[in-house]
Image (cartoon, rainbow, N blue to C red):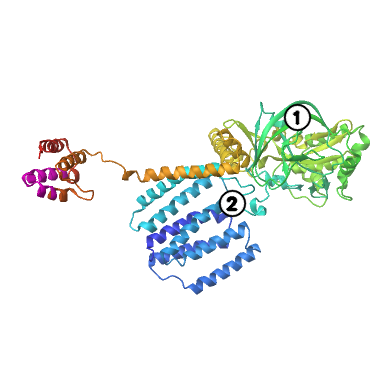
Amino acid sequence: MKPTAYLVYGVIASLLMVIAPHAEHLPVWVTVLSAMMLGWRFYLAYSSNPLPPRWLLLSMTVAITAGIQIEYHTLFGREPGVTLLIILLSLKLLELRATRDATILIFLSCFVIITNFFYSQTIPTALMMLASLLLILSTWVHLHTGTLAFRPRLKIAAVILAQAIPLTLLLFVLFPRVQGPLWGMPQDAYSSSGLTDTMSPGTLSKLSLSQAVAFRVSFKGTSPPHDQLYWRGPVLWDYDGVTWTAGMHVRNKLPQIDHTERPVDYTITLEPHNKRWLFALDMPTRLVTDSTITDDFQLLYKEPVNSRIRYSAHSQLTYRANAEEVPFQLKRALQLPPALNPRSRQLASQWRSGLHDDDAIVKAAITMFNRENFEYTLEPPLLGRDGIDDFLFATRKGFCEHYASSFVFLMRAAGIPARVVTGYQGAEPNLLGGYSIVRQADAHAWAEVWLKDQGWLRIDPTAAISPERINNGLSASLPDSPSLPFIARTQLPWLLKLRFNLDMMNYRWNQWVIGYNTEQQFAFLTRLGMEDVSWQKMAINLMLGVAVLVGILALLMLRHLYKHSNEPAQKLYLRFCRKLAKAGTERATHEGPQDFALRAAASHPQMADAIHHIISLYLSLRYENAPNAEGLRALRREIASFKL
């Protein structure tokens, strides 16, 4: 059967709903081509012109597939797979000739809905896909009803969705969780985001423009002051004149941390970043489950963090770390590339010859940053081959990576072991949700120096340049910077409240829906009273639950077959039928009132007029006019006086 134009419009609208969110992920030429094909099919349906020949569609398919191969160098994986699916779906629309084609497109649209969750699993995405599914079901109802108007079709589709909700919840709770990312190929699960194990000028300043959440933290007790919130990440040792890199992790000796005071317990919900490192307050003193700690106090997870994880941590805000460091590490923390930055080396040599100890050299460097004309900015000028010299003696404008890098260079040039530490600094408290938010914009770099009898000490030269950054965050230190996003610069109370409410919703969504993994599933089922949770018990409970739900829905849908009439006129008519049955004239199940009246009048001719009068009154009350008190009283009197 040939589909109507309105059915074609519904299919086009369904495809548009599920394809549109992919526009930001697809190559531009694919997005434009897909939109042109949808528009072309709309025009053909509107003008009743013939569809393109099959040879043309086949040629387009081959050419577009070759284009995708050239674009991605493969046809497998998330990006090329989704792109190919969307293009083929658009091409299939151009050969929509029969009801069978419409059915295929509707089912494929439901499948494309899933692909949107490969990129985003947020609440807005879920609501958008729910609306898409509602429209697809409405189109499917149109396919089977034909003449039904849009609003009734939409109502039927909404009822179908509502009926599916209990079964969906049951499957969500009891269906075994699949470990790993949503997409089957791990390398496509998440693109690397956030911090890396390298740092060069501009690395962190670019990251500071992102308002994406790095992790959320809930403190047990009072949160530490903002200036104590240093979240330790990758530690960088090796410098080539431009870029700092982490290098290898040496485990000649386990790290030694002498606790002093101020322990902090907290729980972190870490967003996926496709790297192994975990973040903890400086200094972590207890291993996180399934993690190790390196010689430079980094926490490393057992595998790359490709899904959101939640872990508890313990840290000491005051500590003494590796006061007896191995010589190899100290030598490693003094290495510099030769023949670079001569002016910086000369300054460090002057400090070494003129000052009495390492503490004094450290203080001299901090004093230089604090008292001389240095500027903290997101838009530092470009640096030349001798980047440290250019920064310290010429531009004097930089972000945290410039200050940490130049400070560590000066310390090493003066003979003091030093290294760069990257991570995050600060946190934005969400009082509505009872937790704090650490964003990519909080990315920060600081320095560590090793001093005799003191161990590794944190030195943050940025605090000497811009104490507002450390005490109150990036937006406080650069309130008028046009480089920062508007949402990071504004402090309007209503907007902050809206942001916190939305983030709290996302946090709960991530925690209870997206983060519903195997461990949470077993814990939840245990709280429900399911002892010794196993896959066998879950499968049995799932099958029983599905059977019960399907049975309940079937009874609700078929209840009208068992529903007795409560209409007054119908009750009186049935009373009349029972009187005739006692007299030997029983009404057949299939027999209507008029046919029954004719047969009863033939069996009781002496009462024929009374029988026809009663049936006439009943039909008038039941089918012609709304039942009224006077008519019902008249019918009741006639039936009461009817005697055989």
Question: What kind of secondary structure does the magenta stretch mostly adopt?
Answer: helix
**Crowdedness near tag 2: few (<14), some (14–19) or many (≥20) residues, C-alpha within 10 Å:** some
How far from the left and from the top, in percent, is residue 450? Answer: 86, 36
Q: CA distance from mark 1 to mark 2?
A: 39 Å
For badge 2, the amino acid type reads: Phe
Frontmost residue, 80 versus 591: 591
User: Which structural element holds mark 2?
Assistant: loop
Which residue type does callout 1 highlight? Answer: Leu
**Residue 612 covered by magenta stretch:** yes
Quadrant hosting residue 443: top right
SS category of the residue bearing label 1 = strand
Regarding residue 123, the answer to whether it shows in the image is no
Q: Which residue is mark 2?
A: 118
Task: Specify start and end residues of the magenta stretch as a single range.
Answer: 599-618
Residue placed most toward the observer, 369 or 572: 572
State the residue position of label 1. 317
Instruction: Mark 1 or mark 2: name the one nearer the start of the chain.
Output: 2
